[in-house]
Image (cartoon, grey):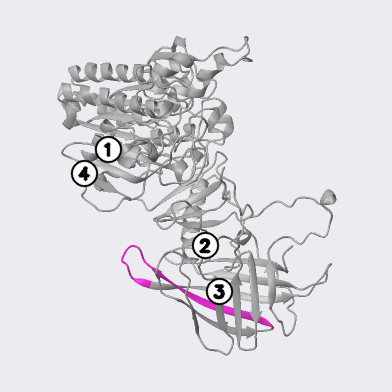
């Protein structure tokens, strides 16, 4: 049972409105739609037939949900299990929920179940909880967060392997399947071992069917949250699906996922309540990565526990007959945090229940219902568990602030990368030097998030460890940068430039090491936007022109070199570089100032909202710096200023090149 402090902490945001609504609930409760939210685990787009399933496993029930409603191809989630559940149930980026949210989500957070319960919904969770941390029992159970009843596992699926491991300590308690009802501490049902792992989703579906039937007969609107455990490893299928698809455990388990969805849908149809029931099926993360249960991300690269598209872009289908037109397919950006506001709006929950905190989600009902063509969001943030920014998506662009992949990377020092996702869905071609105008837009999105942490700080790690949590006064936070990059530091005074510079030669940003490796201290990597020309360049400097070639040693077949030519006689020059889009050329001019060459380039860009063409400006100031140490060679300094457009921020950074390749 909750102590009085925790109870007050939980009820406080809901009290005035929720109690008032409950008093008048019987008059209108049956007019509210029922809600079924099915949330499978680690299913990439390549597993679902309507998304081009690679295994040839039919998924008719999931596919039909999309045919009878809407199927999204740009649905975004958090990178891993626990943060994804925080996001979908609270409507907030998981980073807001705590400095250590894996230790547990505070009872101060208002879940979707609590929101719906405030207007009379019956609520249930059958499946995977994974929000209470290690000390969940009697403290942070689903029934402490708005669910009337639950059945399933408190943590995650791979714990089912523990008791079969040779070295599992006899002194450690085995994992269990649990069940509970509001007002009582949960009880053990049976050990969660490899046998139980095969049947847990079927058992959860059957309990979901009973929950639907019970509340339909009573005329009570219901919220069924069915967080499946498949295809999280070990992806062991139900016995009656084992060996049925010819596609191994993963194919058989996917067939089981679709079968269990069918059980829920069949009951809705049998009861005649399909038209008044919202059904959503979406995955919590991208494809499972652990062998032998390696999942498929479809056209995307990467797996869950990654900020690659394959880790954060997942399948989503939704049906609400009569409200959401059938047959829709959209590539508009939607994020799982949007479901809190969207479902709450559909259920008629007053929006002022959560005014004491920031909600990151937006109501997508007008878009999903087809009354507007575009999503109500243009961007999403991707952060790690420490709240550091990994990447930002804006429309068809993705800017990485700290590029990381489990796949071998030929450019490990290149931390900042921009990808044009519709041209390059595999996130292989860094185009930040070719579309510099995009960077400032992304930066401005991040800075708005950073400023929001001043108004509403992240939940402290101490609160994740134990309740109660009382938020600090609004506006009492401090500005905490979520990423490091050289342009965020104060610019140093420009060094003296050598007279009559000749920039000709081969140049590299690689560190010039003059100390043997056994005595060398590793320097921490600091992300940089670079000069705009790449890490390795070759320059030909003549009296009337400067030619810069990007040095990229990759298989090019018959593709031309990427070369820029700039006139030094005062005339304007044009350079065309095709990065997968046929666009207007770059227009550049040059001038000398105190032995420094200033190159000003105008980049054409198209406003995505109205299609109009504009220009963004970038200046690159070059000078040679006098040598100060061995081997007594001048260094090339390039100071790059990128103009912010469309409300984006401008940036300035410096790049240092050394002669040759070392």
- In three-dimensional space, the C-alpha distance between marks 2 and 3, rounded to whole angstroms, equals 16 Å
- In three-dimensional space, the C-alpha distance between marks 1 and 3, rounded to whole angstroms, equals 48 Å
Q: Is 498 on the left-hand or right-hand side of 622?
A: right
Image: 294 above or below 509: above
Residue 406, numbered label: none
> Tag 1 or tag 4, which sits nearer the N-term?
1
Q: Which residue is under mark 4?
A: 327
Residue 432, numbered label: 2
Q: Is residue 351 visible?
A: no
> Tag 2 or tag 1, which sits nearer the N-term?
1
22 or 613: nearer the eye?
613
Q: Nearer the viewer, mark 1 or mark 3?
A: 3
Mark 3 touching mark 4, by CB under 8 A? no
Residue 487 % position (x, y) = 61, 62
Q: Secondary structure at mark 3?
A: strand
- In three-dimensional space, the C-alpha distance between marks 3 and 4, rounded to whole angstroms, equals 47 Å
Q: Is 344 on the left-hand or right-hand side of 404?
A: left
Q: Residue at x 25, y 45 (%)?
A: 368
Q: Residue at x 47, y 75 (%)?
A: 576
Number of numbered markers: 4
Query: Magenta includes 428?
Result: no
Q: Residues within 10 Å of mark 4 (few under 14, many from 20)?
A: few
Q: Is 657 on the left-hand or right-hand side of 241?
A: right
> Tag 4 or tag 2, which sits nearer the N-term?
4
- In three-dimensional space, the C-alpha distance between marks 4 and 1, rounded to whole angstroms, equals 11 Å
Q: Is residue 258 visible?
A: yes
Where are the magenta residues, as a range? 595-613
Q: Secondary structure at mark 1?
A: strand
Residue 336 % position (x, y) = 38, 40
Residue 318, numbered label: 1
Q: Residues within 10 Å of mark 3 (few under 14, many from 20)?
A: some
């Amino acid at each position: 049972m909750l102590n009085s402090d925790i109870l007050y902490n939980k009820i406080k945001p809901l009290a005035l409105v929720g109690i008032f609504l409950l008093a008048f609930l019987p008059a209108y409760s049956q007019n509210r739609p029922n809600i079924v939210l099915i949330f499978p685990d680690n299913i990439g787009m390549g597993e679902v037939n309507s998304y081009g399933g690679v295994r040839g496993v039919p998924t008719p029930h999931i596919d039909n949900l999309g045919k009878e409603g809407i199927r999204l191809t740009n649905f975004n989630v958090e990178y891993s299990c626990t943060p994804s559940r925080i996001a979908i149930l609270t409507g907030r980026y998981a980073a807001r929920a705590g400095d250590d949210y894996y230790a547990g989500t505070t009872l101060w957070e208002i879940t979707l179940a609590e929101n719906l319960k405030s207007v009379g919904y019956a609520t249930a969770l059958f499946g995977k909880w994974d929000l209470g941390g290690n000390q969940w029992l009697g403290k942070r159970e689903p029934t402490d967060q708005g669910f009337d009843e639950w059945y399933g596992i408190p943590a995650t699926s791979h714990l089912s392997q523990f008791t079969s491991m040779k070295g599992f300590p006899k002194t450690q308690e085995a994992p269990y399947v649990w069940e509970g009802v509001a007002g009582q501490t949960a009880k053990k049902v049976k050990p969660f071992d490899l046998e139980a792992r095969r049947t847990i989703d079927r058992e959860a579906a059957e309990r979901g069917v009973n929950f639907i039937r019970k509340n339909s007969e009573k005329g009570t609107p219901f919220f069924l949250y069915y967080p499946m455990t498949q295809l999280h490893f070990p992806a062991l299928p139900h016995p009656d699906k084992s060996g049925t698809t010819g596609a191994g455990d993963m194919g058989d388990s996917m067939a089981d996922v679709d079968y269990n969805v069918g059980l829920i849908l069949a009951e809705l149809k049998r009861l005649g309540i399909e038209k008044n029931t919202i059904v959503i099926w979406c995955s919590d993360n991208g494809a499972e990565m652990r062998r032998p249960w390696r999942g498929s991300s479809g056209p995307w690269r990467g797996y869950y526990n990654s900020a690659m598209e394959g880790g954060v872009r997942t399948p989503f289908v939704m049906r609400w007959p009569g409200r959401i037109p059938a047959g829709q397919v959209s590539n508009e950006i939607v994020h799982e945090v949007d479901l809190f506001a969207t479902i709450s709006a559909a259920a008629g929950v007053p929006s002022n229940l959560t005014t004491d905190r920031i909600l990151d989600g937006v109501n997508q009902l007008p878009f999903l219902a087809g009354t507007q063509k575009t999503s109500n969001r243009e961007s999403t943030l991707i952060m790690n568990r420490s709240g550091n920014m990994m990447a930002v998506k804006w429309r068809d662009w993705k800017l990485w602030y700290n590029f990381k992949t489990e796949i071998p990377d030929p450019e490990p020092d290149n931390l900042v990368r921009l990808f044009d996702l519709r041209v390059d869905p595999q996130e292989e071609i860094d185009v930040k030097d070719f579309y510099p105008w995009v960077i400032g837009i992304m930066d401005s999105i991040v800075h708005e998030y950073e400023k929001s942490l001043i108004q509403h700080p992240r939940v402290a790690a101490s609160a994740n460890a134990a309740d109660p949590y009382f938020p600090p006064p609004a506006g009492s936070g401090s500005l905490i940068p979520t990423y490091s990059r050289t342009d965020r530091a104060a610019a140093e005074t420009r060094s003296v430039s050598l007279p009559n510079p000749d920039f000709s030669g081969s140049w590299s940003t690689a560190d010039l090491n003059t100390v043997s490796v056994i005595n060398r201290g590793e320097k921490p990597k600091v992300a940089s936007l670079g000069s705009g020309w790449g890490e390795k360049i070759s320059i030909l400097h003549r009296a009337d022109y400067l030619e810069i070639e990007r040095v990229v040693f990759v298989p090019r077949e018959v593709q031309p070199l990427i070369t820029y030519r700039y006139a030094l006689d005062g005339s304007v020059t044009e350079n065309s570089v095709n990065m997968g889009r046929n666009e207007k050329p770059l227009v550049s001019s040059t001038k000398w100032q105190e032995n420094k060459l200033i190159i000003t380039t105008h980049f054409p860009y198209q406003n995505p909202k109205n299609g109009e063409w504009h220009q963004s400006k970038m200046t690159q100031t070059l000078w040679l710096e006098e040598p100060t140490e061995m081997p007594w060679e001048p260094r090339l300094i390039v100071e790059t200023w990128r103009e912010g457009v469309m409300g984006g921020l401008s940036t300035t950074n410096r790049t240092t090149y050394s002669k040759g390749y070392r």
